[in-house]
Image (tube, rainbow, N blue to C red):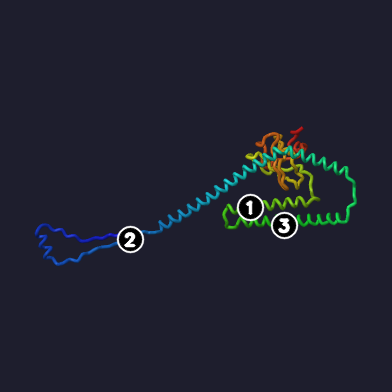
Amino acid sequence: MFILCTLPVLCLQGEEAGREIRSAPPVKAKATVRIELEDATGSNQTLQEQEQLDGARREALKFKRLNFELQKDNKLLRKELIKILENFQTQNEKYRRLQLSIAATIASSRMQAASTREGQLCKSFVEVSDSGRALALKTIEFCDSVAAVVKDIPIGSFRKTELRLKIDALRRDARKLINIADLENRLKPVERCRVLAVNKNLQVVVLPVGSAHGAFLGLNYYIGKERTVAKIIAVRPFVSAAVVVKGSIENVAPGSQAATDVKTINKQFGKLWK
């Protein structure tokens, strides 16, 4: 607020000034007042900008926390893969001994007639497997629908990430159930595919084949024309992770041709392998 006041001033000298002042008629004082109000628009705009800045800082802090959690998960995943790689040889030997033990048991056993109860149990097992497979398929469809809806829900990014992780876990379990129940459609190992992704930080090659396609731990894939060999160390129903055991991971890129048979690679790139 701005105020301006003015008053008339009389300046006379000596006695004459005194006489004139005493003899002069009384004069009314005059004042001029001017009031101006400052515009509050600039102040409101500053407050809005400050609120936006505070909101951006809070959002940046959320993303920073989320990034920290993802980095921690990345380190845990790397440790898990390294542990699987170290224990692979021992697990493979145990599995081999188990196969030999089962083979010996089957060879020494006698054929026995199945009872009526056993037949009923087998029939019930087939029905349960079919029902479980159908339920798992519906679960995957439901997860896909929910994942599409979550993108448009006005919630925080941290909450969205948490929901997506839960949906992915449920989808993986459903696919695992499909793989277990669908015994009749088990396939032989996929002989040829293309690299899905390469994670150089974890030194892992991701292949679009899993246990549903016949992939198993220890299966070798020959990749590209740079004579690179990757061995599967982790298997999921529809995807698997492999580490490079020969050559360099720098020569592997998404989309590179991979095959379990050397002849397939030789047909593609010439006689690289003997």
Q: Are marks 2 and 3 in contact (CB under 8 Å)?
A: no
Up/down of 68 relative to 137, above or below: above
Q: Residue furthest left?
A: 15
Cα–Cα gap, marks 3 and 1:
18 Å
Amino acid type at circle 2 is: Glu
Badge 2 is on which residue? 36
Question: Residue 149 appears in which quarter of the rendering?
Answer: bottom right
Judged from the image, the secondary structure of the residue bearing numbered disc 1 is helix
Q: Residue 218 lies in what quarter of the image?
A: top right
In the image, taking residue 202 as reference, residue 23 lies left or right, namely left
The numbered dot on residue 164 is 1
Asked if residue 206 lies left or right of residue 20, the reply is: right
Task: Pick whichever of labels 3 and 1 is earlier in the sequence.
Answer: 3
The C terminus: image quadrant: top right
Mark 1 touches mark 2? (CB < 8 Å): no
Front-lying residue, 119 or 32 = 119
- For disc 3, the marked residue is 138
Q: Position of residue 122 (x, y in %)?
A: 83, 54
Nearer mark to the viewer, of 2 and 3: 3
In the rendered view, tell whether residue 118 sits above or below residue 211: below
Crowd band around label 1 with a 10 angstrom C-alpha radius: few (<14), some (14–19), many (20+) = some
Helix, strand or loop at label 3? It is helix
- Cα–Cα gap, marks 2 and 3: 72 Å
Q: Give x and y (percent) for residue 17.
A: 11, 60
Say which residue appears at 71% left-offset and 56% top-offset. Answer: 139
Q: Residue at x 81, y 55 (%)?
A: 125
Q: Residue at x 60, y 54 (%)?
A: 160
- Secondary element type, mark 2: strand
Q: Label 3 is placed on what type of residue?
A: Lys
* Amino acid type assigned to the residue bearing label 1 in the image: Arg
